[in-house]
Amino acid sequence: MTRFDSLSVMFLEDEFLIALDGEGMLNSMGVKHVQVVSTLPAAAEFAEKGDVDVAILDLNINGEMSWGIADILHRRRIPIVFASGYELRDRIDSEIGVFLKKPYTPESLKEALEAALAKHIIGPPPSNQIGRSP
């Protein structure tokens, strides 16, 4: 079982109620440091400079995909959980992150976090960008 109480989680979600619910789920798992961001510019800034142990990224933020945020996090070797209501599992490189289907439950969120944290990125990040063809 993974301890979550020392984690700093960046949670990118543009839907207020989903963000509130997800933050509550994380808090109930013992996560004390949750940074909720709702826009791509705010997420990019936090991904570049913030204290982040793991990130949960909604893939579609106000009609734009969050692949660029994933690129930043991947370069920093930060584990990623990709959350989406769309079935995009085939577009997610399992070495980069974990896919979490929305709507998620506390149990599925916990499993996704544990799986993402268990991954160890070895070697340099790939030269191609995440979610796009090389």
Image (cartoon, rainbow, N blue to C red):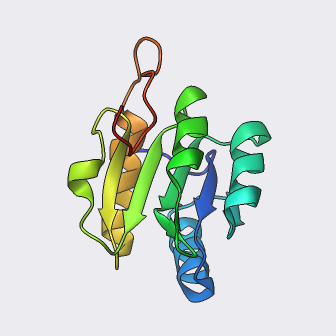
Task: Give coordinates of residue 87: x percent, y percent.
Answer: 24, 67
Location of residue 95 with respect to 99 vertically, above or below = above
Give me the residue at 54% from left, 38% from top: 71
Q: Residue furthest left?
A: 90
Task: Give coordinates of residue 40: x percent, y percent.
Answer: 67, 60
Q: Residue furthest bottom?
A: 17
Q: Quadrant of the C terminus?
A: top left
Task: Give coordinates of residue 81: x percent, y percent.
Answer: 42, 52
Asked if residue 111 can be seen in this view, the reply is: no
Left or right, 44 with respect to 122, comes to right
Quarter assignment of residue 43: bottom right
Asked if residue 134 can be seen in this view, the reply is: yes
Task: Give coordinates of residue 92: x percent, y percent.
Answer: 30, 47
Give me the residue at 51% from left, 58% from top: 57
Give me the residue at 63% from left, 45% from top: 6
Q: Residue furthest top?
A: 123
Left or right, 27 with respect to 81, comes to right
Quarter assignment of residue 133: top left
Left or right, 10 with respect to 80, comes to right
Location of residue 31 with respect to 78 vertically, above or below = below
The residue closer to the viewer here, 109 or 129, is 129
Left or right, 100 with respect to 90, comes to right
The residue closer to the viewer here, 121 or 84, is 84
